[in-house]
Amino acid sequence: MNFPSTAKTDFINPNDYAWHTLSAEAALQTLQSDPTKGLTTEQVAERRQILGWNELQEMAGRHPLTILWEQFTNIMLVMLIAVAVVSGIIDLRQGKFPKDAIAIFAIVILNGLLGYLQESRAEKALAALKRLSSPQVRVIRQGQTLEVEAKELVPGDIMLLEAGVQVAADGRLLEAQNLQIREATLTGEAEALLKQPQAILSDDAALGDRRNLVFQGTEVVQGRGMVVVTKTGMDTEIGRIATLIQSVETEPTPLQQRMSQLGNVLVSSSLALVALVVTVGVLRMGWQTFEGLLEVSLSMAVAVVPEGLPAVVTVTLAIGTQRMVRRQALIRKLPAVETLGSVTTICSDKTGTLTQNKMVVQQFTTPSTLYQVTGEGYSPLGDIQRQGQTVDELEAEAELLLMACVLCNDALLQQKEGQWIILGDPTEGALLTLAAKAGLYREVLGENMPRRAEIPFSSERKRMAVIVEKASATGHHLVFSKGSPEILLEACRYQQSDATPTELTPEGRQAILQINDQWAAQGLRVLGFAYRTLPDGNLDEAEKDLVWLGLVGMIDAPRPEVKLAVQQCLAAGIRPIMITGDHQLTAQAIAYDLGIAQPGTEILTGKDLEQIGQLELDRIVGDVSVYARVAPEHKLWIVHALQNQGQFVAMTGDGVNDAPALKQADIGIAMGITGTDVSKEASDMILLDDNFATIVAATEEGRVVYDNIRRFIKYILGSNIGEVLVIAAAPLLGLGGVPLSPLQILWMNLVTDGLPALALAMEPAEPNVMSRPPYNPRESIFSRGLGAYMLRIGIIFAVLTIALMVWAYQYTQGSPNPERWKTMVFTTLCLAQMGHALAVRSDTQLIVRLNPFSNPYILAAVGFTSLLQLLLIYVAPFRNFFGTHWLSGQELAVCFGFSLLMFVWIELEKLVINAWFKYRSNIS
């Protein structure tokens, strides 16, 4: 985009300039602006005409009516609509009320609305981004300070900032007085940055290091400043993220792809069978039977479509979401429930997800002794150990070191609602916790040794010091100092040896630095401590000739449950990957500890990613399990690379910059505690506890859901194939009429199929659900024997029912009610499905070996559905509506007998399969 200069002769593009490399004066000159007068009204109007308003622009999405229309272009619903139309015409021609057509249309509408409700959930990530901009902003225009709407800003405007406001556009700092801005929404770093308008940075400075710029959507925490606006609207960093979010195309989930494939196969098979039946029927019986054959075809078409399947799938996914909520995972998009079961790679942030987000001291050393520390978080429960043995009483030098940890400290350790929390810096909180484990508390020490002065920490000094007064000796003071070991050691002349200082030799200094380097290589954050006695009135000597006390090493420790979760991942064939903005050594230490990576494994940094590019990353991404010092935008590259290798990726994120990667990932996972609204709206799932172990638990639930979906698809479609074959056989065998009406088929597909199918969705997890690799997310719905099972069981269903149908037809002919054979066929199919529902609970175990109460819902569904079927036969209003006939006790017993044969056949088949596999395993 371009805009004219004041003279309307020169045009510039704000995106052509790396504003952090320019001085404030050069930025003003480039933008033709003045810090005291700002822009004129004419300049503002000219620039807005070219650049537009300072607001995020939403790309046109699908209109709600388009989404609704697309539901009814589903191939199975199109076939049902055609069936309903033809059925209605036939009924009206015969003078009947078209109840079959009305019932089919009702099912079509319900399924269409169900699909619409799932797909029409508007993406709100852009709305969340828009909320990051302040509605009003103070600017200087024509020499006057004005308050205008944020959307009216243009490049060149002079914007005034103060504590508490949100930055309304990207800009170059001109002036700043202790201006601190929290940029967590962009960089993920919670700590506010001190801005420096005088800084001129290199072109490759990372976003989080651009201290001379401000960015839209960030928050002014402290101070005030003056900024010249450089970028507005979609050209800002927030706008760039909005573009990335909207450019990510939503791919169908594995379940949606499988359901589409299922519909295509069912409809094409149905049409082929209809054509076969009509052709054979016309050839055998002539064109005069065409209308009767058409009725058969309509029943077959209704039978082949599992009308209740969409509702059952939706309810199953909803049940899965409830299970996941109980395990601290909130599902935002229903298909994500099943998609989780297909995950092959989990990319996780480190801080707070793999770790506790709490600094914990692991060990400390005095000049003579090394100590280990146990315990978790900020709780003062834990032991101080020496060579594996708990220390009951510390040596004098160790006690003095821990006193320094407490007194040279500005944090507070508190217990609130049973939880130990820190007010202040987490590093200082860890020091208080360490001292508390030795019985040294701030409240007691602070009273006995009150602070009299302080020399604060600065980036140049890299240490802080406090001066406290000895309560036992009025007028005598002690100085305690902590900071970078290398820097603090330079100020030390002595080291503490038991109760007295001794000369610090060059060898002693080298030994201290060597320990510091070793601990740093282990990923520990290391602080040095020193002290001295201060002569009265000589504060200038406070940080000279210090006495070295020792080192303290701490780390953001892994969550205790994560190590097991990582092992579960690996056992389940899921590869965990750590992606962090933290230092490489820290990331390496945590990754080794958790088992995410092994010694010698390659670790890439953000700078490495910038250098190698996407093609090289695609090649090596399979070998890299740890990424450190990574900017959030690099996550998008990593997701692309993994997906290019055929991986199914879950990605965690919490910042605004993470949103594009969350949308690109197959499963985007936002942090519920630390996550921004933008990341949550872009995600498929929210971790309510920000815990990696929760991702693993949700993955397990996803596998259970997919297993249960396959289980009830096997159940429903095996039965449907049997229905279709029975209906097709009737005219070919010369039996009078269609054995099942469309209304009866709808009853079977919705009620006798639907209720047990819902109960099957409640089946608990198989014992090996997390000890096998994930199934290929691109596998066919018919894979792993499901298609063969459906055909096999469908044929057995048909053979047994056709045998009953032939017998029943002959048995009822000549009786007062010769149509009873149709009701016997209807009842046999329904009751056989109940036995099938019980048998399909397990592929290998016999029903007698299954715990009948592990899923009480299936028993209830079978009993209730069987009762409903009897009501259709023996309650007159139902009998009249569904067109059934009264059956005698003997006839009903025959129906039960044939249904039982179906159940026995499936159970015998399990025995044969188990015997075969046992035989094969013995041979091998």
Image (cartoon, rainbow, N blue to C red):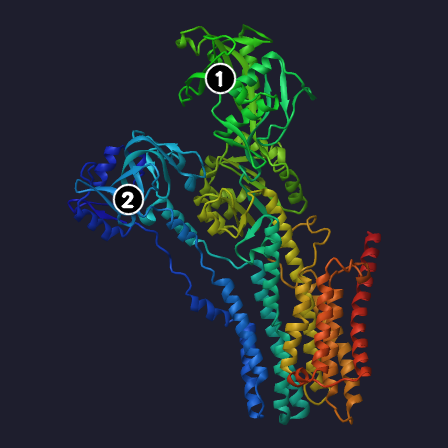
Q: Give residue 620's position: percent from left, percent from top.
A: 55, 41
- In the image, residue 793 sits, relative to residue 773, either above or below, namely below
Quadrant location of residue 257? bottom right
Marks 2 and 1 sit apart, C-alpha to C-alpha, by 46 Å
- In the image, residue 479 sits, relative to residue 912, either above or below, namely above
Q: Give residue 32's position: percent from left, percent from top.
A: 20, 40
Secondary structure type for disc 1:
helix
- In the image, residue 502 sits, relative to residue 60, either above or below, namely above
Report which residue position mark 1 lands on: 486
Horizontal relation, residue 304 to residue 853: left or right: left
Secondary structure type for disc 2:
strand
- In the image, residue 810 sits, relative to residue 633, either above or below, namely below
Q: Nearer the viewer, residue 13 or 655?
A: 655
Report which residue position mark 2 lands on: 137
Horizontal relation, residue 504 to residue 910: left or right: left
Q: Give residue 658's position: percent from left, percent from top.
A: 46, 45
Quadrant location of residue 816? bottom right
